[in-house]
Image (spheres, rainbow, N blue to C red):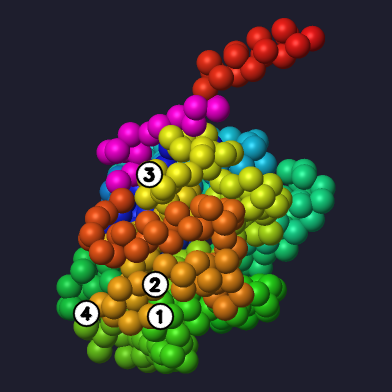
């Protein structure tokens, strides 16, 4: 309501955030937070394995360096870009919620950005000084200590961001206290951090299995040892991840867990939810079985055996992010701001006066027969477009046609009767925020979209119209009139 709204009608706005976020989580968890301590441990083992006259086992160290090169290149390119890209896309698509989060977590976010930039610099230092560190044992030991320091620094960036993610799910006492401390200590924070930490280590192990297979030959003497080390790493962290996931699940509010069957896909997918739980079980079990098999017969491990649990573990992480994003609906910030970016406390005012009157960017403040479709378009953009498109992914037309019949003309009166009550049946939907006139305009606009096949353009292509009553000229005129009356 306070910002001109960016909209991708063919893709769905939240899908854009989801794509960037899932790629970033793969990289952040698998090749940074979990990967750096894993690589540092391997580097340290090279020194332990070396002879009394050697600084490190050179063949081993070369393998670990090549593995780190993959992490270095991906984290400092795609990792950095998608890290910034999440918040850039979120600010475009969900500006009100990002604005609120910045006001709450200003110093926390400021700290995270400093830590994030330093992390990228430290990763570069760690990787680029690797070969020089092999000139003396003292230099190598200093390099390993720096690796452990970098590992903790990388974890710190996640620890700060998880506080914000937890807050968005359940702000806890912040609703009453409105302080940074109460926001940081939200009830979801610690359980989510305890889950993400061992999970990142497990995913790093999955990456490790794959990279060892790619960077060593079958006849290599170091491959079995490297694989067994990785297997032990996975088996140590996997039980902690499973236990933490149970703890995390048990602290999630009941209203959110009720959304899970829909969160993994769509309403149509809900009936397959039980099947999905088995897929998650298979993903974790396959990685455990790979680790056990590796300890038993490391020379029998091949690339295919490694790729299957690797892909499944990434799939599990992707599903987790999808579910975490969805289950907090109908809110984008729990119990504070709905997914349509309207604060819960503003609903009584908007349902009385209408959302157009209080919107900064709309050309219509009074609805007439002549401007009804344009008014309906503005209502849809404000109240619906953060989750729905006109003809693309999660199309509002398809949603109603599934209810009333595919290909059949939509009934305006039926939509008007359903929309104000939709949140009662679909609890992940926010309540309708407007008044009766705007409801009529919205229903007519949805009918128009179905009949015409028209699409909805965002402010990035269609431009934006300032509400005449929100202009500087209007406020000056009001001020002058008030002065005259005084």
Of marks 3 and 1, which one's residue comes earlier in the chain? 3
Of the two numbered discs 1 and 2 in the rendering, the one whose residue sits closer to the viewer: 2
Question: Which mark, residue 378?
Answer: none
Of marks 3 and 4, which one's residue comes earlier in the chain? 4
Q: Are marks 4 and 1 in contact (CB under 8 Å)?
A: no
The magenta region covers 457-470
Distance from the alpha carbon under mark 2 to that under mark 4: 56 Å
Distance from the alpha carbon under mark 4 to that under mark 1: 47 Å
Q: Are marks 3 and 2 in contact (CB under 8 Å)?
A: no
The residue that label 1 is drawn on is 403
Mark 3 nearby-residue class (10 Å; few <14, some 14–19, many ≥20): few
Residue in front for this viewpoint, 360 or 314: 360
Confirm whether the magenta stretch covers residue 462: yes
Mark 2 nearby-residue class (10 Å; few <14, some 14–19, many ≥20): some
Secondary structure under tag 4 reads helix
User: Relative to 69, is 98 above or below?
Assistant: above
The residue that label 4 is drawn on is 303
Residue at image location 35% in from the left, 72% down from the top: 410
Of marks 2 and 4, which one's residue comes earlier in the chain? 4
The residue that label 2 is drawn on is 411
Distance from the alpha carbon under mark 3 to that under mark 1: 29 Å
Residue at image location 44% in from the left, 57% down from the top: 442
The residue that label 3 is drawn on is 370
């Amino acid at each position: 309501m306070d910002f001109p709204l960016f909209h991708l009608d063919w893709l769905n706005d939240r899908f854009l955030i989801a794509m960037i976020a899932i790629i970033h989580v793969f990289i952040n968890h698998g090749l940074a937070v979990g990967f750096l301590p894993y690589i540092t441990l391997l580097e340290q083992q090279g020194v332990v394995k070396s002879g009394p006259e050697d600084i490190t086992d050179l063949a081993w160290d070369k393998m670990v360096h090549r593995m780190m090169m993959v992490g270095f290149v991906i984290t400092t390119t795609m990792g950095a870009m998608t890290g910034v890209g999440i918040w850039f896309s979120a600010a475009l698509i969900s500006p009100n919620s990002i604005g609120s989060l910045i006001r709450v977590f200003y110093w926390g976010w400021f700290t995270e950005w400093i830590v994030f930039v330093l992390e990228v610099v430290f990763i570069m230092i760690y990787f680029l000084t690797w070969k020089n560190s092999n000139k003396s044992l003292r230099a190598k030991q200093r390099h390993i200590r720096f690796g452990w320091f970098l590992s903790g620094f990388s974890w710190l960036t996640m620890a700060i961001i998880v506080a914000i993610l937890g807050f968005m799910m359940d702000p806890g006492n912040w609703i009453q206290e409105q302080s940074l401390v109460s926001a940081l200590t939200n009830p979801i924070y610690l359980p989510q951090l305890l889950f993400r930490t061992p999970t990142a280590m497990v995913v790093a192990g999955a990456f490790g299995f794959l990279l060892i297979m790619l960077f060593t030959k079958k006849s290599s003497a170091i491959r079995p040892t490297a694989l067994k080390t990785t297997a032990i790493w996975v088996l140590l962290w996997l039980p902690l991840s499973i236990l933490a996931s149970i703890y995390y699940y048990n602290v999630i509010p009941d209203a959110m867990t009720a959304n899970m069957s829909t969160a993994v896909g769509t309403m149509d997918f809900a009936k397959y939810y039980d099947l999905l739980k088995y897929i998650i079980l298979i993903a974790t079990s396959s990685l455990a079985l790979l680790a056990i098999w590796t300890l038993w017969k490391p020379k029998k491990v091949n690339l295919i055996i490694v790729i299957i649990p690797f892909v499944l573990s990434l799939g599990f992480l992707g599903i987790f992010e999808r579910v975490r994003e969805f289950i907090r609906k109908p809110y984008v910030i729990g119990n504070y701001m709905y997914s349509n970016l309207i604060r819960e406390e503003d609903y009584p005012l908007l349902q009385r006066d209408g959302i157009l009157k209080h919107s900064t960017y709309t050309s219509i403040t009074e609805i007439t027969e002549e401007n009804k479709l344009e008014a309906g378009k503005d209502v849809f953009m404000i109240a619906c477009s953060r989750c729905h498109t006109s003809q693309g992914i999660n199309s509002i037309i398809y949603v109603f046609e599934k209810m009333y019949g595919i290909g059949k003309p939509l009934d305006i009166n039926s939509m008007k009767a359903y929309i104000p009550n939709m949140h009662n049946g679909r609890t992940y939907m926010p309540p309708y925020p407007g008044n009766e006139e705007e409801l009529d305009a919205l229903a007519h606009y949805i009918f128009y979209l179905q009949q015409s096949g028209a699409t909805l353009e965002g402010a990035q292509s269609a431009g934006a119209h300032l509400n005449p009553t929100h202009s500087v000229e209007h406020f000056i005129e009001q001020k002058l009139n008030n002065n005259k009356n005084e």
